[in-house]
Image (cartoon, rainbow, N blue to C red):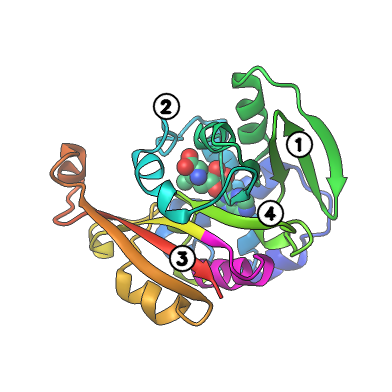
Amino acid sequence: MIVAEALSIGSKKTNRDRRSRHRHSLLEVGVHYGVECGRCKLVEKVFWEDRWDEERIGFHQSVFNEYLLQFWPQVGAPEGAKVFVPLCGKTLDLHWLQQQGHKVLGNEVVDKAVDDFFREADLQPTREEQGGVTALEAKGICILLGDFFDLTAEHLEGVTAWYDRAAQVALPPETRKRYYAHLHSILPAGAVGLSLAFEYPQEEMPGPPFSIEESEIRKHYADGFKIELVGRRDRLAFEPTLKEKGLSRANEVIYLMERI
Ligand SMILES: C[S@@+](CC[C@H](N)C(=O)[O-])C[C@H]1O[C@@H](n2cnc3c(N)ncnc32)[C@H](O)[C@@H]1O
């Protein structure tokens, strides 16, 4: 069934058709999300489109991220540095990075997220097709609208720093390995990143956000990145809702990573 659906990708189907055909993945997201379905790329996009359409965007913060403010100085990115922000949604952190004098290069796959970002900031971006993705740009912030896995090293030319908040944790294990491999293939050598992850017993809650233990980071990604753990914060103590969700442990972990 899934393979048959995969073969019909090229035929003309509406988004609604795709959604109903892929309900299995959306409902059983913890199992199928990006792992077992032959059309995982599409499933993931539809999954996120639905969340944005239905405004189920609890991950979006109405303030700048506290760890960005606290740990960004350790990245050591000078004024003028070009900073890549994968899977950026409509995060206000793009504004904060721009205010530090950086050139900001976000990436997001859902049109609505990008439209909302510029509209809410009262900005009218220019639009340009750039090698399979659309670059929208205003006031020193460029967002590449398209699938992260379609980005190339050319898109990231000149990038010397990056910031991952709620990007890697948005992806299930198999996709996450592809994410790191692809990130490595498109980032210039020497680029330094601030990378945030969650740690919690995965069996206690389905993702996203997914849990990423330090052991996974060190085991799977150390070939391509120098990794330094710079902070670990116990979230259970501050967010009672996490306990209500049944979590017995929940940490936010902050890494500095250098693409080698
Ligand atoms: C959990 S949200 C985090 C957004 C943002 N980083 C933040 O902190 O608010 C993950 C975002 O990644 C986007 N996304 C998921 N898969 C993607 C992909 N393959 N390429 C680009 N964006 C993607 C989703 O649409 C969503 O906006």
Question: Which numbered disc, 4 or 2, marks the residue closer to the eye?
Answer: 2
The answer to whether residue 152 of the structure is visible from this angle is yes
What secondary structure is found at the residue carrying circle 1? strand
Q: Position of residue 148 (x, y in %)?
A: 65, 57
Secondary structure under badge 2? loop
> Is disc 4's CB within 8 Å of ligand 1?
yes
Front disc: 4 or 1? 1
Crowd band around label 2 with a 10 angstrom C-alpha radius: few (<14), some (14–19), many (20+): few
- Provide residue 42's location: percent of width, then percent of height: 66, 56
Picture quadrant of residue 242: top left
Residue behind mark 1: 136
Magenta residues span 175-192
Q: Which of marks 3 and 2 is in front?
A: 3
Report the residue marked by disc 2. Answer: 62
Q: Between residues 256 and 40, which one lies in front from this camera angle?
A: 256
Counting residues from the N terminus, which is met first, the one under dot 1 or under dot 2? Answer: 2
Q: What element carries label 4?
A: loop
Q: How far apart are the two marked residues, 3 and 4, measured between alpha carbons?
A: 23 Å
Q: Quadrant of residue 214?
A: bottom left
Q: Mark 3 points at which residue?
A: 257
Q: What residue would you read off at disc 4?
A: 147
Q: Which amino acid does label 2 sit on?
A: Ser
Q: Which amino acid, by three-letter code, is at mark 4? A: Asp
- Amino acid marked by disc 1: Leu
User: In the picture, which quadrant includes the C terminus?
Assistant: bottom right
